[in-house]
Amino acid sequence: MQQIRTLNFRNVDEVLAFAIKTEENAYEFYTAWSGKLEDKSLVDVFKELAGEELKHKEFLLGVKKGATLKPSAKEITDLKISDYIMDVKASTDMDYQDALTLAMQREKEAFKLYTNLAAVSADNTMKSTFKALAQEEARHKLRLEILYDEDILKEN
């Protein structure tokens, strides 16, 4: 993912177009990999994540039309598991652990992206929208970290 400071947006529409494209890319990634993985439970997780990314795109399209997306007051727990594991690259021979790791990395990057977009946004509606999307990505990461903790760490 690109660092926010290297992006130059001239207006809110450009920010939203970038965020929509980011969600489309995440949807395509999870959809494509759900078809390449052999572990049924992980395939299901990736399909669900793809669906969530599609919902994020729909939220953003709604914001373009005037809707508001507000963050929850409830803080999302961060197990920080992804902070302590090695990065992996996508490959057709990924095992369950690598696939979870890759997904956690992607969700962590998406969280950082939306957090940074919220921080640099002067428009309060956009700031609120990006904070809400950051929370959604944090929820995804938490879900993946819980799976990793239950299925990988507790086995070792």
Image (spheres, grey):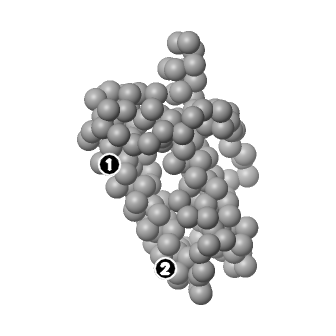
Q: At 57% across and 35% down in the image, what residue appears?
A: 86
**Mark 2 residue element:** loop
**Numbered mark located on residue 31 in the image:** 1
Q: CA distance from mark 2 to mark 1?
A: 27 Å
Q: Position of residue 54 (x, y in %)?
A: 40, 57
Q: Looking at the image, which residue sits at the far top?
A: 156
Q: At 54% across and 39% down in the image, what residue appears?
A: 87
Q: Looking at the image, which residue sits at the far bottom?
A: 10
Q: Is residue 64 above or below residue 104?
A: below
Check disc 2 and give the amino acid type: Lys
Task: Identify the image quadrant of residue 153.
Answer: top right
Q: Position of residue 43 (x, y in %)?
A: 33, 35
* Count of numbered marks: 2
Mark in front: 2 vs 1: 1
Q: Position of residue 28 (x, y in %)?
A: 34, 55
Q: At 58% across and 24% down in the image, what residue appears?
A: 149
- The answer to the question of whether label 2 and label 1 lie on touching residues, with beta carbons closer than 8 A, is no
**Mark 1 residue element:** helix
Quadrant placement of the C terminus: top right
Q: Is residue 154 visible?
A: yes
Q: Position of residue 108 (x, y in %)?
A: 59, 48
Label 2 CA crowd tier, 10 Å (few <14, some 14–19, many 20+): few
Q: Is residue 102 above or below residue 93?
A: below
Q: At 71% across and 72% down in the image, what residue appears?
A: 120
Label 1 CA crowd tier, 10 Å (few <14, some 14–19, many 20+): some
N-term-proximal mark, 2 vs 1:
1
**Numbered mark located on residue 76 in the image:** none
Check disc 1 and give the amino acid type: Thr
What residue is shown with label 2?
A: 65
Position of 125 with respect to 23 (left or right) is right
Q: Is residue 38 above or below residue 3?
A: above
Q: Is residue 48 visible?
A: no
